[in-house]
Image (cartoon, rainbow, N blue to C red):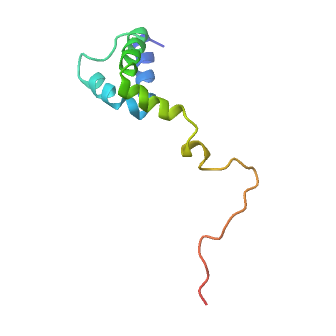
Amino acid sequence: MEDEELAAIFVRGLPPVFNQLKVVFAIPGQAPTSFDAAITSVRKFAADPTVAAELAKLKSNGLSQTMFPACSTCSRLPLFHSVS
């Protein structure tokens, strides 16, 4: 796999916090030419205090990680109640 392809896959897999950076990379001629250049650009962007705060929220144990219980035999509730 070429270095440019790896960079494109890496950028595509970034969380939504990096959408502004993805927009910049979408401009012709602005996409990183190597995987190392992509990593360097993302690290510089992540060093911004606002982005760092958003990334910290993603790492924290919040509702998003505990919203759905992990169980092998969860009880199923009926979708509709019968009306008599």
Percent position of residue 57, x then y: 48, 34
**Which picture quadrant has residue 10?**
top left
Give the residue displayed 39% in from the left and 32% down from the top.
17
Q: Nearer the viewer, residue 42 or 63?
A: 63
Give the residue displayed 44% in from the left and 11% down from the top.
2
Percent position of residue 55, x then y: 46, 29
Give the residue displayed 31% in from the left and 17% down from the top.
31
Q: In the picture shown, does residue 82 fall above or below 61?
A: below
Give the residue displayed 61% in from the left and 82% down from the top.
82
Most extreme residue toward the right is 73
**Which picture quadrant has residue 76?**
bottom right
Percent position of residue 70, x then y: 69, 47
Q: In the picture shown, does residue 65 fall above or below 27?
A: below
Q: Is residue 61 left or right of residue 36?
A: right
Q: Is residue 8 left or right of residue 82?
A: left
Q: In the picture shown, does residue 9 fall above or below 77?
A: above
Q: Is residue 27 left or right of residue 71?
A: left
